[in-house]
């Protein structure tokens, strides 16, 4: 079994929240009779079955309460982008170019370097390029609402799960760390997504958020004069994100400002105007 096909630990039913149990599927039509039986996950409560296909575990809920037209637009857009581009291409995740992605990754690596033997979830992972470097020494779950993006993440070494961020199909306190990179600005209900992300992190675990800066003059200009860039393009300030994390039980909160497309980033405390920072990143630890 390839690592990407490995059943995710502590997965739960997206409908009734019951822990899923693994069993062997002896009736898989896609495997020859002498092949190893394919694993599947079963809910002992509602008896719903979940299977892996091409390295992706499909844990989508039976009902889509909370998933609105804006979310559907982004899901279809990312399906299209990912199907058109290589799984190693960050522009499939709506980054303008490779340089923009590399700058973000460089800024966040100060919080990610040295992670070993951890169970980590990358929510809204896209093709999984941010967390793929962590896979050799950690178990990384890549969760995305786009099936094509989840497939790309599986190719990049993540244990890929197709599921919505507003209903993460994992038990409470499962993960030692979580990432939510460039996601909050496009989801229809950021509060629900943050509730879910913090729910699945263990006490003492960490969370990293990055999103568009409310005070950025460039972001304000783009949002006002180019509204066709997609629905729900929200902007956040560092104080807003810190408040969101504090309210959900996080402490030791720190942040960085990214001055894209320039190639540098600075702590929030740096004496540089926040109106020039296009992106903010926040790190917190759950109590």
Image: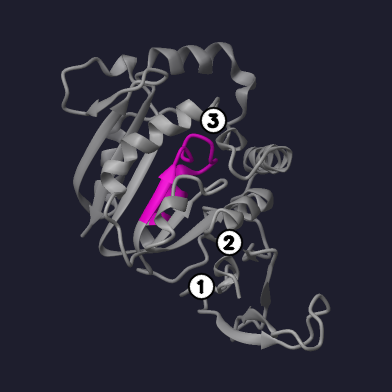
Q: Where are the magenta residues, as a range?
A: 178-197
The foreground one among 240 and 255 is 255
Q: Which residue is mark 1?
A: 11
- Give how far across and how far down residue 51 sits, in percent: 68, 73
Q: Which residue is mark 2?
A: 161
In the image, 22: left or right of 103? right
In the image, 12: left or right of 102? right
Residue under the image location 56 percent in, 46 percent down? 126
Q: Residues within 10 Å of mark 2 (few under 14, many from 20)?
A: many
Residue under the image location 62 percent in, 28 percent down? 230
Q: Residues within 10 Å of mark 1 (few under 14, many from 20)?
A: many
Asked if the residues shown at circle 1 and circle 2 are in contact, with their CB atoms under 8 angstroms apart, the answer is yes
In the image, 12: left or right of 56? left
Secondary structure at numbered mark 3:
loop
- Give how far across and how far down residue 234 sits, in percent: 48, 29
- Give how far across and how far down residue 285 sits, in percent: 23, 53
Q: Earlier in the sequence, mark 3 or mark 2?
A: 3
Q: Which residue is mark 3?
A: 95
- Give how far across and how far down residue 120 sits, in percent: 39, 60
Asked if the residues shown at circle 3 and circle 2 are in contact, with their CB atoms under 8 angstroms apart, the answer is no
Asked if the residues shown at circle 1 and circle 3 are in contact, with their CB atoms under 8 angstroms apart, the answer is no
């Amino acid at each position: 079994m390839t690592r990407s096909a490995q059943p995710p630990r502590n997965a739960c039913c997206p409908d009734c929240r019951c822990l899923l149990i693994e069993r062997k599927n002896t009736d898989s039509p896609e495997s020859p009779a002498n092949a190893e039986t394919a694993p599947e996950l079963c809910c002992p409560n509602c008896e719903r079955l979940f299977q892996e296909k091409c390295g992706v575990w499909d844990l989508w809920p039976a009902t889509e309460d909370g998933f609105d037209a804006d979310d559907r637009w982004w899901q279809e857009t990312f399906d299209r982008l990912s199907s058109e581009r290589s799984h190693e291409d960050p522009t499939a995740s709506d980054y303008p170019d490779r340089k923009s992605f590399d700058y973000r990754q460089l800024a966040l690596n100060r919080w990610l370097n040295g992670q070993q033997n951890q169970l980590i979830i990358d929510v809204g992972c896209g093709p999984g390029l941010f967390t793929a470097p962590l896979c050799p020494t950690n178990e990384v779950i890549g969760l995305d609402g786009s099936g094509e993006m989840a497939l790309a993440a599986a190719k990049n070494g993540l244990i890929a799960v197709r599921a919505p961020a507003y209903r993460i199909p994992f038990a409470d306190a499962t993960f030692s760390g979580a990432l939510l990179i460039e996601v909050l600005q496009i989801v229809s209900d950021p509060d629900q997504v943050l509730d879910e992300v913090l729910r699945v992190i263990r006490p003492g675990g960490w969370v990293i958020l990055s999103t568009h800066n409310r005070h950025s003059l460039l972001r304000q200009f783009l949002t006002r004069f180019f509204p066709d860039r997609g629905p729900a393009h929200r902007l956040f300030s560092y104080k807003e994100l810190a408040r969101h994390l504090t309210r959900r039980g996080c402490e030791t909160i720190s942040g960085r400002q990214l001055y894209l497309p320039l190639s540098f980033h600075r702590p929030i405390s740096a004496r540089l105007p926040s109106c020039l920072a296009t992106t903010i990143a926040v790190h917190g630890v759950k109590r």
